Image: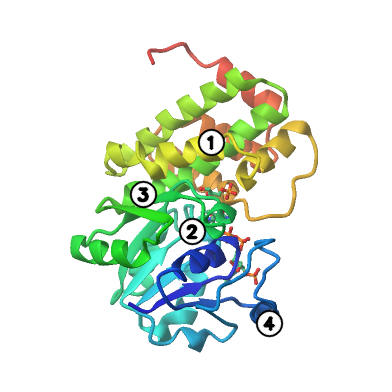
Amino acid sequence: MKIGVVGAGAFGTALAVSLAANGPVWLWGRAGMEAVATSRTTPRLPGITLPEAVHITGDINGLAGCDVLLLAMPMQALADTLPTLSGLRARYAVACCKGIDRTRLTGPAEIIASAWPHVTPAVLSGPSFAADIARGLPTALSLGCADEAAGSKLQDALSTPTLRLYRTTDVTGVELGGALKNVIAIACGCAMGAGLGESARAALMTRGFAEMQRFAAHVGAQPETLQGLSGFGDLALTCTSAQSRNYTYGLALGAGTTPAHATVEGRATAQALHTRAAAEGLDLPITAVTAAIVTGQITVKDAMSRLLSRRLKEE
Ligand SMILES: NC(=O)C1=CN([C@@H]2O[C@H](COP(=O)(O)OP(=O)(O)OC[C@H]3O[C@@H](n4cnc5c(N)ncnc54)[C@H](OP(=O)(O)O)[C@@H]3O)[C@@H](O)[C@H]2O)C=CC1
Ligand SMILES: O=C(CO)COP(=O)(O)O
């Protein structure tokens, strides 16, 4: 299968580098690709040399004829980007972005299905820092595809000697695991940045995981999916590592400093998730305070008092 990657940010480039171990792969980015092609390096992944098997292009038609497109742009850019790519006519589109669309309140699979009804959508998610994948460190991810035969083909095509894919037909579970863990990672960063301690972080991770499972069950995802790589696995990684942009964004908010300019998917997703949960009568208290923090409505201190003063209940 001919594989193309849309989006030459850290993750798209890392996936292309890993897939190059299997054969040629095409990588498209919207800016600065001539310099990437010449130097075979990118500022998004310092210290990594892009193998010759990665065909680098700034022309979207360079992805013509690809059977599989890996969509590696930020979640909030997905819906507007897809119509500009419809000339490509791939058979499979694999969302590699993590989040819930703030306007449509859905995940990437639904957005792909409505923009490209002729394409089989899939979602790739799980604990994986781009830098680790690009360095060839062992990584395991979940691949969600409702069509079992297509999922199996994609699993074969996208696994590499260092990137091991597990497949499931529970697309919703896979996309929610990746989307919701970012919200909890921001909350954990806030707690750590504010000096509330590791016990507080463990409590937020645990009760945050309960919220992830509650929302996932509400929308029909399977509980085991959330307990897997995209869910528990990615939650554990993102809530505890200074490599995570969501966690470090929270750290800065908690410490009262200015967050770095970076792709922080949990910011929009916290708002989308809170809006949807509130409309559907679902209680997600950590999500609610995180959405209020990232929109500047409350401080981290207010958020903790709000969580601690909730009515006592069974676990
Ligand atoms: N980095 C990581 O470790 C991981 C990231 N992910 C997910 O991958 C997705 C992308 O993240 P990542 O690669 O790290 O982000 P980066 O910030 O490194 O790169 C984002 C890429 O998307 C492009 N882009 C940004 N806005 C638009 C737009 N409006 N239209 C089209 N393209 C756009 C950027 O182009 P330009 O360079 O021109 O700005 C860039 O190529 C996110 O959803 C993230 O959660 C998943 C797992 C790991
Ligand atoms: O999703 C990731 C790791 O699995 C990357 O996390 P950040 O987007 O927070 O950097």
Which residue is labeled 1 in the image?
184
Q: CA distance from mark 2 to mark 3?
A: 11 Å
Q: Residue furthest left?
A: 149
Q: CA distance from mark 1 to mark 4?
A: 40 Å
Residue 194, quarter of picture: top right
Which residue is labeled 2 in the image?
97
Q: N-terminal of the two: label 1 or label 3? A: 3
Residue 311: give x, y in percent of width and height: 48, 13
Q: Is residue 95 visible in this depiction of the protein?
A: yes
1 vs 4, front mark: 4
Q: Residues within 10 Å of mark 1 (few under 14, many from 20)?
A: many
| Amino acid type assigned to the residue bearing label 2 in the image | Cys
Q: CA distance from mark 1 to mark 2?
A: 17 Å
Q: N-terminal of the two: label 1 or label 2? A: 2
Q: N-terminal of the two: label 4 or label 3? A: 4
Of the 4 image quadrants, the one containing the N terminus is: bottom left
Q: Secondary structure at mark 1?
A: helix
Q: N-terminal of the two: label 2 or label 3? A: 2
Residue 9: give x, y in percent of width and height: 60, 65
Q: CA distance from mark 1 to mark 3?
A: 16 Å
| Amino acid type assigned to the residue bearing label 4 in the image | Thr
Q: Residue furthest right?
A: 257
Which residue is labeled 4 in the image?
38
In this picture, residue 185 sits left or right of residue 91:
right
Q: Is mark 2 within 8 Å of ligand 1?
A: yes
Which residue is labeled 3 in the image?
174
